[in-house]
Image (spheres, helix red, strand yellow):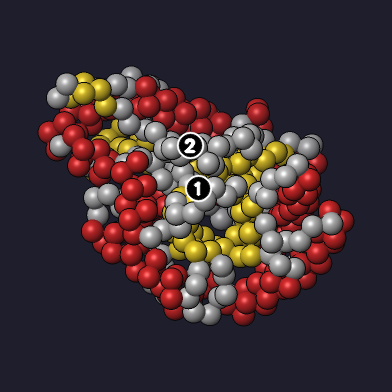
Amino acid sequence: ESGRMLFYLELDNFNVLKETIGIGATDTLIAEVARALLGRVPEGGILSRFGDSVFTLMLQVPHIRVAWDVAEELRIAVGERIVDVSGKSVTSTCSIGICPMLSRARAPETVLAHAQHSCRTARKQGGNRIEIHFPAGSKPEVAKMKVESPGTAVAQALDGGQLSMLFQPIVNLHEDSMEVYEVFLRVTGEGGMPLSEASIFSAEVDAEVVTKLDKWVIERVIALMASRQRDGHNTHFFVRLSEQAIVDESMLLFISKQLRSAQISGKCLVLKLSEASAMSQVKNVKAFIKGLKQLECRAALEDFGTGLTSFNTLRHVPVDFLKIDAELVHTLATDHESQSAVRSIVDMARSLRKRVVAVGVEDAATLAMLWDMGVHFAQGDGIQVPSESLEWDFAGSEIS
C-alpha cells in the first residue's frame, strides 16, 4: 500500500552485550527496549519482535518525512533507555532500516530483505543511524507520497551550496603519531536533514551530479591538505570516490590539476573504492589506480572481507590499504569466524605489503584484539565520532 512502511530495527553490538552481561541480563534489556519502543509507536503501528535483537514495525504514513521522524524517535528511545542489571547500568543503541511497501504488490520477503539491508548499511556506517531504501522504479509511488527522491535532493543541495565535510580520525595502532582522517561528505536535504551516504550515491542520482560531488570533495580536501602542510601538519585524508569516478576520463586530470594548483604531491591523499566496484570492473579499477600512482596518490579498498572472491580480487587490484568490513569488526569480540577472517586478511595484507584499517570500532576490547592481530589502523565512533574538527590528539588520545 502506498504510504505503508516497514521498519527493521536491530540493536547495535548485541553479541558484545550478551557476552558482557549474560543471556539473562540481555533478556531484561530486550524487555525494557520493547517497552521503550511501544511508548513511541504511533497509533496504528504494528510492532513485533523478529529476532534476538531485532524488532519490526509496520506503519502507514502520509509522508516519508514522517517515517524518518518516527524512526528517529525510536532510535532516541532505545539510546535513552538505561537498564539496571546485576548492579550495572546498561544502555544500547540501534540501527534502523526502512523500506516502503509500495502498491506493486511486491513480495513481503523482498520488502523485508531491503529493510534488513538498509539496517545493515546503517550498522556498517557505525550504527545508531537510520537508512531508507528507495526501490528502483518507484517514482510513481514516491510522487504520491510526496517523497523527494535522492537524485532531486542531492541536485538541489549541490545547487544550493548545502554541502559540507566531516572528519573522523583513523588511529595508527603500532607506530608513532600520524595524522590520518576519513572524510565524509554531508549533504543537507529537505528540512535541514542530512542525507545518508547510501542516498547520496544512489543509482537515482544523475551521473553528472555524482561527478560534481566527487570533484567538490577532492578540490576542498586538496586545498585543506595544502593549508595543513603550510601550518606544519602532514595530514593524510581518506576520501570516498563514486563508481562513476572510475570510468570518468576527466577525474584523473582533475585531481592532477588540483594538486598542481595547490603545489603539493598526492602522497597524503588516499582515494577509496568499494570492493563491489573492484569485483565488477577489475580492468577499469586497475587502470584508474595506475593513474593515481602516477600522481603519487594511494588507493584503498573498503568493505573488504565479506565477498566470496575478496582475496582473489585483491591479487588483481593494486591498492595500498584494505578497510575491513564493519560487520566483521562489530562481531570480532564474540565470533570466532570473524576473528579468523580478520587474521586471514592481515596475513594476506602482510604478504602483499598492504596496510589494514579496521572500521566501526566501538570499544576498547575490540581495539585490543585488533592490535594483537596486527591490524595497522582503527577508526570508529568508539574512538571519535565524525565532526567538523581536525583537532584530534593522535599522540595522546585513548579510546574510552
The amino acid at mark 1 is Val
Q: Nearer the viewer, residue 331 or 297?
A: 297
Q: Which mark is residue 80?
A: none
**Residue 70 or residue 127, whichever sits in front:** 127
Q: Earlier in the sequence, mark 1 or mark 2?
A: 1
Q: CA distance from mark 1 to mark 2?
A: 9 Å
Q: Residue at x 44, y 78 (%)?
A: 312
Relative to 28, say whether 153 is above or below: below
Q: Return the mark for residue 397.
A: 2
Residue contact between numbered discs 1 and 2, judged by CB atoms under 8 Å: yes
Residue kind at label 2, given as amino acid type: Ser
Report x, y in % for residue 198: 56, 49
Tell me the SS state at disc 2: loop
Question: Residue 4 appears in which quarter of the rendering?
Answer: top left
Category of crowding for the residue at label 1, using alpha-carbon neighbours closer than 10 angstroms: few (below 14), some (14–19), many (at least 20): many
Residue 124 place in picture, x, y as percent: 44, 49
User: Which residue: 26% across, 42% down?
Assistant: 16
Outermost residue on the front side: it is 176
Residue 171 bears which disc, if any? Answer: 1
Asked whether, in this view, residue 316 is left or right of residue 96, the answer is: right
